[in-house]
Amino acid sequence: MDEWIDYYDSTHTIYVSKLHRELHFKLIARDIIAYIDRPDQVVLDYACGEALSSNMVADACGTLILAEAAPGVRGRLIARFAPDTRIKVRSLQEVRNMPEKSVDLAVMNSVSQYMTADELDQALQVIRRLLKPSGRLVLGDVLRPEVGMFRDVIALLRFAAMHGFFRDALIGLVSTALSDYRELRKNLGLQRYGEAEMIAKLERNGLIGTRVRTNIGYNPWRMTFVAVHAPGVE
């Protein structure tokens, strides 16, 4: 995962325009909010990235913890949200040291593809320890083995056409094809899981998961799972 952390900590071209970037994070925030049950809940966004619209999520909960591995991204999060006392920015190591049973809702969105299978296991074990007995994990934007890059392109173009940046999307796709991202994706690959495979992985880590109907974000060909503590697992 270190190479991906370095990539996202650099000046990358994963978003085709400023509008794409802003709309992407607003949509994710909206989808996360749908899982918040009460305004006093503690929400953990694990490996959150830039999380531009975190103020929207903070408006819907009591405390929002933004956990990010990339130090440059983490610094920007601290600078951006410093005035908002409801938002706490933490490293992944700091999250590992948080008290157990201290989180109502944990979100891992568009993260699993960049982790090795062992790294994801470790993250799931940390999150399970942090979740309150009634807590939930939302694991979103999971890539499926049978769905390739073509569907990602279609999803982006549909989203762009709906929101008025279709031309930028076409130009951005060409730029991405020539960028370090394509080379990194080719060399490292992206981790993919079938539905049953992910449910079994969650169970091995003490969580009972089910796939939900709607994925977080704009790509309907990726999967989102909701998981809770497995009965009898400490």
Image (cartoon, grey):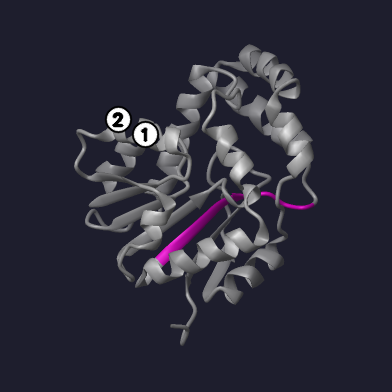
Q: Say what amino acid the circle numbered 1 marks.
A: Gly
Choose between 51 and 158: the one closer to the eye: 51
Residue 31 seen: yes
- The residue pinned by badge 2 equals 79
Report x, y in % for residue 90.
35, 48
- For image coordinates 35% across by 63% down, the residue present is 97
Q: Tell me what residue is drawn at x 61 percent, y 40 percent.
A: 4
* Depth order, front residue of 60/201: 201
User: Which disc number belongs to residue 75?
Assistant: 1
Asked if residue 121 is positioned above or below residue 163 in the image, the reply reads below
Residue visible at 49% across and 19% down?
19
Residues under labels 2 and 1: Cα distance?
Answer: 6 Å
Residue 35 place in picture, x, y as percent: 40, 54
Segment tinted magenta in the rendering: 136-145
Q: Which quarter shows the C terminus? A: bottom left
Residue 83 sits above or below residue 227 on the image = above
Measured from the top left, where is residue 166 in percent x and y? 63, 16
Task: Please identify the dominant SS of the magenta region.
Answer: strand
Q: Are marks 2 and 1 in contact (CB under 8 Å)?
A: yes
Of 50 and 143, nearer the camera is 50
